[in-house]
Image (cartoon, grey):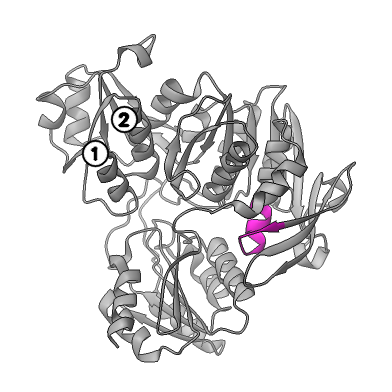
Amino acid sequence: MADPLSELRHVHFIAIGGTGVGSLAGLVHARGIRVTGSDRALYPPMSTALESWGIEVEEGFRPENVLDDPPDLVVIGNAVRADNPEAVAAIDAGLPYRSFSDALYELAIASKHCLTVTGTHGKTTTTSLCAYLLEATGREPSLLVGGISLDFGGSFREAAGEHFVVEGDEYDTAFFDKTPKFLHYHPQTLIITSVEFDHADIYRDLDHVKSVFRELVAGMPVDGTIVAAWDHEGVRDVVAGAPCAVVRYMAGEAREERGGGGEPADCDLIATAIESDLDATRFTLRVRGADEREVRIPMYGRFNVENTLAALAATRALGVPLAESIAALPGFRGVKRRQEVRGVERGVRVIDDFAHHPTAVRGCVEALRAQHPDARLIAVFEPRTNTSRRRIFQAAYVDALAGADHIVVFEVPDEPIYSATGEVTELFSSLELVAALGERGVSAASFDSVDDIVTHLVERHREGDVVLVMSNGSFGNIWERLLEALRSA
């Protein structure tokens, strides 16, 4: 397909409910191209987004979805397995098909300067923030992000500017292409926020994860730029020997605060004097070769300070003066499901966050503690991901959640866990987590139904409580159910 933009009239997306796949579907639909799709049961925010865009979605995977009205191109999401009847039918019928990652590059990125945001944590927020700063300073960027950006009113945006900002995932591309998705975007500017073990269904260990980041770094053009979180050992490791310029950033500079991380003297941007209140986080920005500047951001947690430094460094490398970006920062609205306040009832503030890896869970708990130091903080956690349902982070979740005043853990069903790295025999235990927290003197409980969790929270609620719900799934719409129960209490 030499010129896919001119030839396409109808594109069909298999597993359209994924945040990346659904976002690309929205971008293609916005060009006036007919878009259809299929998936299992969808959940917000992508389900509501697809409905609002008027995209036709079939529930379930069936050969007739692609054979009855053959599209010009079939895009196959990475959640689709090799025995998917719809994908098999499309390939056997000789229909043109692409992985999501290749389709995104060919249809949207290839003609732009690509800024790719990667890392175990912070990708969605940092991607949205980079695009916001470019837009706020008049650069008109295009965007595709794995979440709903409140500043752009969605997860994608196509514009006239020269930059395309994309969230780059290390997960594999498709059942027919096991390379990481981020290798397909060919960035000229690359952010690496962190490198930790995750996606245990496809990666054996941390070294395996590092190997694909090293491959990404090695493929950077010599005139490119890597923006690296120098406080993270995994990042320092994978960027060693990079073929291009590396811009280093760090939040805080005390060795005990960093746990013996990289040296501040090696960094180009450092945040110091970090303080938070109910309205914002403030810090002093030190930039190599420039004056100190005071920065205010409408986000909380050290990890969001790091995300801000990454975005400032990347946009500066793209020619945006720091003064312009810093002036724009207070207007950033953020991303849905990242410390999102779902509502307040009877004085109880209910907050939704996508956190699921123990590092992200700890960071989110610490951020809400800093923002609400006098409130009783109740953390509700659903260990839903492939990695979190394994025993590997059992002890890490104790440390991650112990900063809350009361913890409620959902007891996940005892079901088989998919793995490409061998049989999974050691599973995460909610009961063991609760017991370990109790040994530390931290109040905790576990339940096997959302109804029981809601009842528990309503019975214990006090005015002024902050309830932080952390899950990367729909969690039975626990947020609205809790708010409704509080209204009726």
- Image location (x, y in percent) of residue 345: 39, 80
Which structural element holds mark 1? loop
Q: Badge 1: few (under 14), some or many (20 or more) residues near its Cα, within 10 Å?
A: few
Q: Is residue 211 visible?
A: no
Where does label 2 land, which residue? Answer: 29
Against 1, residue 336 (above or below) is below
- Image location (x, y in percent) of residue 406: 48, 84
Q: Amino acid at mark 2?
A: His
Give the quadrant of the C terminus. Answer: bottom left
- Image location (x, y in percent) of residue 114: 57, 28
Contact, mark 2 vs mark 1 (Cβ under 8 Å): yes
Against 55, residue 254 (above or below) is below
**Mark 2 or mark 1, earlier in chain:** 2
Q: Amino acid at mark 1?
A: Gly
Where does label 1 land, which residue? Answer: 54
Magenta segment, which residues? 296-307
